[in-house]
Image (spheres, rainbow, N blue to C red):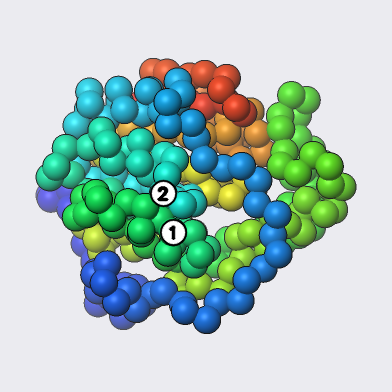
Protein backbone atom coordinates (compact mmCIF):
# COMPACT_ATOMS: atom_id res chain seq x y z
CA UNK A 1 0.00 0.00 0.00
CA UNK A 2 1.25 3.48 -0.82
CA UNK A 3 2.36 5.62 2.13
CA UNK A 4 0.80 8.68 0.45
CA UNK A 5 -2.15 10.04 2.36
CA UNK A 6 -5.45 9.81 0.56
CA UNK A 7 -7.53 13.00 0.34
CA UNK A 8 -11.28 12.53 0.18
CA UNK A 9 -13.64 14.76 -1.77
CA UNK A 10 -15.09 15.82 1.60
CA UNK A 11 -11.66 16.99 2.72
CA UNK A 12 -11.23 18.95 -0.50
CA UNK A 13 -14.54 20.72 0.09
CA UNK A 14 -13.58 21.52 3.68
CA UNK A 15 -9.97 22.54 3.18
CA UNK A 16 -9.89 23.56 -0.47
CA UNK A 17 -7.19 22.85 -3.00
CA UNK A 18 -3.53 23.88 -2.50
CA UNK A 19 -3.16 27.62 -2.88
CA UNK A 20 -0.59 29.92 -4.41
CA UNK A 21 1.46 32.44 -2.45
CA UNK A 22 0.17 35.26 -4.65
CA UNK A 23 -3.42 36.23 -3.96
CA UNK A 24 -3.77 33.80 -1.06
CA UNK A 25 -7.54 33.52 -0.55
CA UNK A 26 -7.05 32.51 3.08
CA UNK A 27 -5.59 35.83 4.16
CA UNK A 28 -7.99 38.17 5.89
CA UNK A 29 -7.22 41.78 5.01
CA UNK A 30 -9.62 43.28 7.55
CA UNK A 31 -8.63 41.35 10.66
CA UNK A 32 -8.91 43.60 13.74
CA UNK A 33 -5.75 44.08 15.73
CA UNK A 34 -5.83 42.74 19.29
CA UNK A 35 -3.75 44.42 22.00
CA UNK A 36 -1.90 41.22 22.94
CA UNK A 37 1.49 41.83 24.61
CA UNK A 38 3.43 39.26 22.57
CA UNK A 39 6.47 37.81 24.37
CA UNK A 40 9.85 37.33 22.70
CA UNK A 41 9.32 34.33 20.45
CA UNK A 42 12.16 34.17 17.91
CA UNK A 43 15.02 31.76 18.46
CA UNK A 44 18.58 33.05 18.27
CA UNK A 45 19.69 32.43 14.69
CA UNK A 46 23.30 31.99 15.81
CA UNK A 47 22.49 30.01 18.97
CA UNK A 48 22.89 26.34 19.88
CA UNK A 49 19.28 25.43 18.99
CA UNK A 50 19.66 26.95 15.53
CA UNK A 51 22.87 24.98 15.03
CA UNK A 52 21.14 21.74 16.12
CA UNK A 53 18.24 22.35 13.71
CA UNK A 54 20.58 22.97 10.80
CA UNK A 55 22.69 19.93 11.67
CA UNK A 56 19.56 17.72 11.74
CA UNK A 57 18.39 19.05 8.37
CA UNK A 58 21.80 18.60 6.75
CA UNK A 59 22.06 15.07 8.18
CA UNK A 60 18.56 13.82 7.31
CA UNK A 61 17.97 15.96 4.19
CA UNK A 62 14.19 16.25 4.69
CA UNK A 63 12.01 17.17 1.72
CA UNK A 64 8.69 17.99 3.43
CA UNK A 65 9.25 20.41 6.29
CA UNK A 66 6.47 21.79 8.48
CA UNK A 67 6.65 24.62 11.02
CA UNK A 68 4.11 26.21 13.33
CA UNK A 69 4.58 29.69 14.75
CA UNK A 70 6.28 31.54 11.88
CA UNK A 71 6.22 34.90 13.69
CA UNK A 72 8.03 37.35 11.37
CA UNK A 73 10.04 34.67 9.58
CA UNK A 74 13.38 35.92 10.88
CA UNK A 75 13.89 33.21 13.53
CA UNK A 76 13.48 29.47 13.08
CA UNK A 77 11.92 29.88 9.61
CA UNK A 78 15.11 31.46 8.29
CA UNK A 79 17.29 28.97 10.18
CA UNK A 80 15.42 26.06 8.55
CA UNK A 81 15.36 27.64 5.09
CA UNK A 82 19.10 28.27 5.07
CA UNK A 83 19.79 24.57 5.73
CA UNK A 84 17.25 23.09 3.28
CA UNK A 85 18.05 21.53 -0.05
CA UNK A 86 16.79 23.51 -3.02
CA UNK A 87 14.18 20.91 -4.00
CA UNK A 88 12.74 20.66 -0.46
CA UNK A 89 9.67 22.59 0.63
CA UNK A 90 8.82 24.26 3.96
CA UNK A 91 5.21 25.01 4.88
CA UNK A 92 5.16 27.40 7.83
CA UNK A 93 1.93 28.30 9.63
CA UNK A 94 1.06 31.61 11.32
CA UNK A 95 -2.33 32.81 12.56
CA UNK A 96 -1.55 36.53 12.96
CA UNK A 97 -2.07 38.38 9.68
CA UNK A 98 0.46 41.08 10.58
CA UNK A 99 3.17 38.46 11.14
CA UNK A 100 2.10 36.66 7.94
CA UNK A 101 2.68 39.83 5.92
CA UNK A 102 6.03 40.49 7.60
CA UNK A 103 7.16 36.88 7.19
CA UNK A 104 6.26 36.73 3.50
CA UNK A 105 8.40 39.79 2.93
CA UNK A 106 11.27 38.55 5.09
CA UNK A 107 11.51 35.08 3.51
CA UNK A 108 10.79 36.13 -0.07
CA UNK A 109 14.38 35.33 -1.00
CA UNK A 110 13.70 31.64 -0.23
CA UNK A 111 10.82 31.35 -2.70
CA UNK A 112 9.74 28.80 -3.94
CA UNK A 113 11.16 26.64 -1.13
CA UNK A 114 9.31 28.43 1.69
CA UNK A 115 5.54 28.95 1.80
CA UNK A 116 3.93 31.02 4.57
CA UNK A 117 0.37 29.92 5.30
CA UNK A 118 -2.18 31.98 7.23
CA UNK A 119 -4.39 29.95 9.53
CA UNK A 120 -4.82 28.16 12.84
CA UNK A 121 -2.61 25.08 13.12
CA UNK A 122 -5.19 22.96 14.99
CA UNK A 123 -8.97 22.58 14.62
CA UNK A 124 -10.68 25.53 16.26
CA UNK A 125 -12.69 23.32 18.59
CA UNK A 126 -9.40 22.21 20.21
CA UNK A 127 -8.54 25.74 21.36
CA UNK A 128 -8.68 25.73 25.17
CA UNK A 129 -10.92 28.16 27.03
CA UNK A 130 -9.48 30.68 29.45
CA UNK A 131 -10.46 28.53 32.44
CA UNK A 132 -8.57 25.54 31.03
CA UNK A 133 -5.51 27.68 30.27
CA UNK A 134 -5.59 29.07 33.81
CA UNK A 135 -5.77 25.55 35.26
CA UNK A 136 -2.72 24.54 33.18
CA UNK A 137 -0.77 27.57 34.39
CA UNK A 138 -1.66 26.88 38.02
CA UNK A 139 -0.40 23.30 37.89
CA UNK A 140 2.91 24.05 36.18
CA UNK A 141 5.70 22.03 37.82
CA UNK A 142 8.50 23.88 39.57
CA UNK A 143 11.14 25.12 37.19
CA UNK A 144 8.80 25.53 34.20
CA UNK A 145 8.44 29.03 32.79
CA UNK A 146 5.38 30.94 31.64
CA UNK A 147 5.16 34.12 29.58
CA UNK A 148 4.48 37.60 31.00
CA UNK A 149 6.05 37.17 34.47
CA UNK A 150 4.69 40.53 35.65
CA UNK A 151 1.05 39.55 35.05
CA UNK A 152 -1.29 37.54 37.24
CA UNK A 153 -2.19 34.00 36.21
CA UNK A 154 -5.66 35.20 35.26
CA UNK A 155 -4.21 37.90 32.99
CA UNK A 156 -1.81 35.40 31.41
CA UNK A 157 -4.69 33.04 30.62
CA UNK A 158 -6.56 35.92 28.98
CA UNK A 159 -3.62 36.95 26.79
CA UNK A 160 -2.81 33.38 25.79
CA UNK A 161 -6.42 32.94 24.69
CA UNK A 162 -6.38 36.16 22.65
CA UNK A 163 -3.01 35.32 21.10
CA UNK A 164 -4.35 32.10 19.56
CA UNK A 165 -8.04 32.77 18.95
CA UNK A 166 -7.85 35.12 15.96
CA UNK A 167 -10.49 35.46 13.21
CA UNK A 168 -8.63 33.45 10.57
CA UNK A 169 -10.53 31.91 7.65
CA UNK A 170 -9.26 28.38 8.13
CA UNK A 171 -8.19 26.04 10.91
CA UNK A 172 -6.57 22.57 11.08
CA UNK A 173 -3.67 23.87 8.97
CA UNK A 174 -1.37 21.05 10.10
CA UNK A 175 -3.74 18.59 8.45
CA UNK A 176 -4.21 20.81 5.42
CA UNK A 177 -0.48 21.15 4.80
CA UNK A 178 0.15 17.42 5.21
CA UNK A 179 -2.78 16.09 3.21
CA UNK A 180 -3.32 18.76 0.56
CA UNK A 181 0.12 20.35 0.13
CA UNK A 182 2.67 17.57 0.81
CA UNK A 183 0.22 14.68 0.26
CA UNK A 184 2.54 12.64 2.50
CA UNK A 185 3.54 12.95 6.17
CA UNK A 186 6.30 15.50 6.85
CA UNK A 187 9.86 14.35 7.50
CA UNK A 188 10.79 17.41 9.59
CA UNK A 189 8.54 19.32 12.00
CA UNK A 190 9.25 22.40 14.12
CA UNK A 191 6.54 23.15 16.71
CA UNK A 192 6.73 26.67 18.11
CA UNK A 193 3.24 28.18 18.27
CA UNK A 194 1.69 30.22 21.11
CA UNK A 195 2.87 29.30 24.59
CA UNK A 196 -0.18 27.33 25.69
CA UNK A 197 -0.75 25.37 22.46
CA UNK A 198 2.39 23.23 22.30
CA UNK A 199 1.03 20.06 23.89
CA UNK A 200 -2.26 20.29 21.97
CA UNK A 201 -0.42 20.84 18.67
CA UNK A 202 1.83 17.87 19.32
CA UNK A 203 -1.08 15.53 20.05
CA UNK A 204 -2.82 16.70 16.86
CA UNK A 205 0.36 16.28 14.81
CA UNK A 206 0.78 12.70 16.04
CA UNK A 207 -2.41 11.73 14.19
CA UNK A 208 -0.55 12.26 10.92
CA UNK A 209 3.02 11.07 11.59
CA UNK A 210 3.19 7.79 9.68
CA UNK A 211 6.77 7.96 8.40
CA UNK A 212 10.19 8.65 9.98
CA UNK A 213 10.47 12.31 10.99
CA UNK A 214 12.72 14.74 12.85
CA UNK A 215 10.91 16.79 15.50
CA UNK A 216 12.26 20.08 16.88
CA UNK A 217 10.66 21.58 19.98
CA UNK A 218 11.30 25.05 21.38
CA UNK A 219 10.53 25.90 25.03
CA UNK A 220 10.67 22.48 26.67
CA UNK A 221 11.02 23.96 30.17
CA UNK A 222 7.95 26.09 29.62
CA UNK A 223 4.16 25.76 29.59
CA UNK A 224 4.45 25.26 25.83
CA UNK A 225 6.23 21.91 25.64
CA UNK A 226 7.10 20.50 29.08
CA UNK A 227 4.40 17.84 28.64
CA UNK A 228 5.51 17.11 25.07
CA UNK A 229 9.07 16.51 26.28
CA UNK A 230 7.86 14.22 29.07
CA UNK A 231 5.90 12.22 26.49
CA UNK A 232 8.68 11.75 23.95
CA UNK A 233 11.18 10.78 26.67
CA UNK A 234 8.91 7.85 27.59
CA UNK A 235 7.82 6.85 24.07
CA UNK A 236 10.14 4.30 22.43
CA UNK A 237 9.33 5.69 18.97
CA UNK A 238 11.30 8.83 19.80
CA UNK A 239 15.04 9.23 20.28
CA UNK A 240 16.32 12.56 21.61
CA UNK A 241 19.45 13.40 19.63
CA UNK A 242 20.14 16.92 20.89
CA UNK A 243 18.94 19.15 23.70
CA UNK A 244 19.92 22.37 25.42
CA UNK A 245 18.92 24.93 28.02
CA UNK A 246 19.07 28.02 25.82
CA UNK A 247 16.13 30.32 26.66
CA UNK A 248 13.47 27.93 28.00
CA UNK A 249 15.04 24.72 26.73
CA UNK A 250 14.87 22.89 23.39
CA UNK A 251 15.04 19.38 21.98
CA UNK A 252 15.62 17.71 18.62
CA UNK A 253 14.32 14.14 18.38
CA UNK A 254 14.06 11.43 15.74
CA UNK A 255 10.73 9.63 15.31
CA UNK A 256 10.35 6.09 13.98
CA UNK A 257 6.71 4.92 13.68
In the picture, measured across the screen, residue 101 lies left or right of residue 167, that is left
Q: Earlier in the sequence, mark 1 or mark 2?
A: 2
Q: Is residue 157 visible?
A: yes
x 30%, y 22%: residue = 55
Whether 34 is drawn above or below 163: the answer is below
User: As displayed, is residue 238 above or below residue 22?
Assistant: above
Q: Quadrant of residue 16?
A: bottom left
Is residue 95 or residue 78 the one in the foreground? 78
Callout 1–callout 2 Cβ contact below 8 Å: yes
Residue at 57% from the left image edge and 19% from the top image edge: 245
Q: Residue at x 34, y 78 (%)?
A: 25
Which quarter of the figure is the C terminus placed in? Answer: top left
Q: Position of residue 164 (x, y in %)?
A: 60, 60
Q: Alpha-carbon neighbours of circle 2 within 10 Å: few (<14), some, or many (≥20)?
A: many
Q: Residue at x 52, y 40 (%)?
A: 42
Spot occupied by residue 135 in the image (x, y as percentages of width and height) = 79, 48
Q: Badge 1: how crowded within 10 Å, few (<14), some, or many (20+)?
A: some
Q: CA distance from mark 1 to mark 2?
A: 7 Å
- Residue 161, percent across and down? 69, 60
Name the residue beneath numbered marker 2: 73
Residue labelled with disc 1:
102
Tell me if residue 206 can be seen: no
Residue 228: image x %, image y %? 55, 35
Left or right placement of residue 40 versus residue 78 in this view:
right
Amino acid sequence: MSDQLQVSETDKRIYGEPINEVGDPLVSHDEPELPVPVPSVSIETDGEFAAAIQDAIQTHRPQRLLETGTHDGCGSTTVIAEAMESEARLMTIENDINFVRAARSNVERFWPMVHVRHGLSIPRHLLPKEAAILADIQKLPEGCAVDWPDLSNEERAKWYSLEADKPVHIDAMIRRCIELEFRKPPDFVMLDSAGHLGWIEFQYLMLFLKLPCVLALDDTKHLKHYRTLAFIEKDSRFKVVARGSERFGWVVAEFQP
